[in-house]
Amino acid sequence: MRELLLVRYGEIFLKGLNRPVFIRALVKRIKRALQDMHATVWVNDSRIFVSDVPDMDECVRRVTKVFGVHSVCPAVEMGKDDFDAICNQAIAMMSGLKGSFKVIARRSDKRYPLDSMAIGRELGHRILESNPALTVDVKNPDHIMNVEIRDHAYLYVQVIPAVGGMPVGTNGRATLLLSGGIDSPVAGWMIAKRGVQINAVHFHSYPYTSDRAKEKVLDLARIISESCCGIRVHIVPFTKIQMEIHEKCPDEYSTLIMRRYMMRIAERVALQERSEALITGESIGQVASQTMAALGTTDCVVNMPVFRPLIGFDKVEIIDIAKKIGTFETSSLPYEDCCTVFTPRHPATNPKMDKILEGESKLDSEALIEEAIAGIEIVTC
Ligand code: ATP
Ligand code: MG
């Protein structure tokens, strides 16, 4: 007899002929999440199992974060020939539980002497006898004792919900503009949840932004990496561009012009990384640079789609997700971001494109962008 984890997948079940591809992708992601645990991950009859884990609680914690996993069930695998032993194990797993229950038995081994109905009936009967705090309810039970007879017998009661979504890598790649704030890690997490492999770009304005501010961003990448399966973070030296904008462009437009440079550089990184889209954490009207008109002026400098999954979210809603995915605390640490270092006193909320272009014409854009890109440091989180 041994303990193992039965992994259930949700939406990928719907993928018809592609199903094996999705299962393979999911297995790869689960293996990666458990890399240092030397667990065995295997597929049997379209079901994914994890065994040989030194610490089941930690295993559950990690696997429930893997995109594509719908729920996990800690299960017991045992020999199927001794039916009394199976009943005793089921009784042990139901002891201490209260309320109603039913037994669901499945028999894929059709040579097994008892059929599913008979297994269910007998097990239900013995569980009831052993635990007076339980009653039977086949329509809406509080607990379900699952018994599956395959090459072995598998028993499980507990179903632990997981994150859902689709396995990372099954839906292309995108590049996240990752700041140290609350929004952008949530935005990246949401897109990765749809199976997109993400990498990130962070603009760093040393010495105006400190090494600790950079570390904070890498910590955020590490947190979402548990679900996003490894993130290459490109740290872009941004001080020179910011200084030039600050010196040569109208103050009210400095944030927007800065954001346009961020988009241009992010697009180049995206092309190098073979990404098909950019992701930002913007939401309509959150700040002056995120009015609809302002978003339009940053969108138009790139030729790839810009995904803004938080566009219709209120800050409180974003904070709720940040708490759920574990980034909120780190995002709330009070380190400066390059956006906050050179904030104009009266930023333009209804920007005029000719003013933006006039400001940018004073900068040697191509040289500045190339220099920034040449100075990129890549950290894998
Ligand atoms: P918050 O709004 O919680 O402070 P934020 O990450 O949304 O955090 P904003 O100033 O609202 O920060 O910036 C809007 C978007 O621009 C961010 O969501 C992010 O995608 C991008 N961004 C801002 N600053 C940086 C930066 N230093 N490096 C990379 N991307 C950035
Ligand atoms: Mg924001």
Image (spheres, helix red, strand yellow):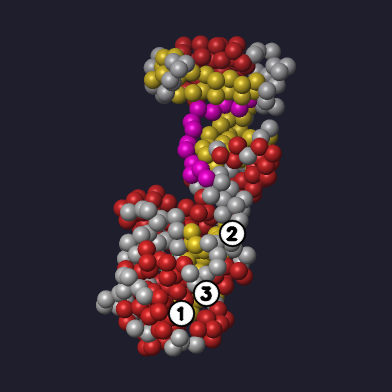
Image point (56%, 15%), residue name: 120
Image point (51%, 37%), residue name: 71
Spot the residue most to the left: 345
The x, y position of residue 141, in whole percent, is 43, 20
The x, y position of residue 117, in whole percent, is 59, 13
Disc number lying in front (1 or 3) = 3
Whether residue 335 appears in this view of the structure is no
Residue named by callout 1: 238
In magenta segment, residue 157 = yes
In magenta segment, residue 111 = no
Q: CA distance from mark 1 to mark 3?
A: 10 Å
Residue closer to the observer: 275 or 51: 275
Q: Quadrant of residue 258?
A: bottom left
For the N terminus, give its image quadrant. Answer: top right
Residue named by callout 2: 173
Figure check: 218 above or below 255: above
The x, y position of residue 231, in whole percent, is 55, 62
Q: Which mark is residue 358?
A: none
Figure check: 177 above or below 249: above
Residue closer to the observer: 275 or 134: 275
SS of the residue at dot 1? loop
- For disc 2, the neighbor class at 10 Å (few under 14, some 14 to 19, many from 20) is many
Say which amino acid is labelled 2.
Answer: Arg
Say which amino acid is labelled 1.
Answer: Phe
Q: Quadrant of residue 376?
A: bottom right
Say which amino acid is labelled 3.
Answer: Ile
Image point (44%, 88%), residue name: 362
Spot the residue most to the right: 111
Residue named by callout 3: 265
Segment tinted magenta in the rendering: 153-165
Q: Quadrant of residue 110?
A: top right
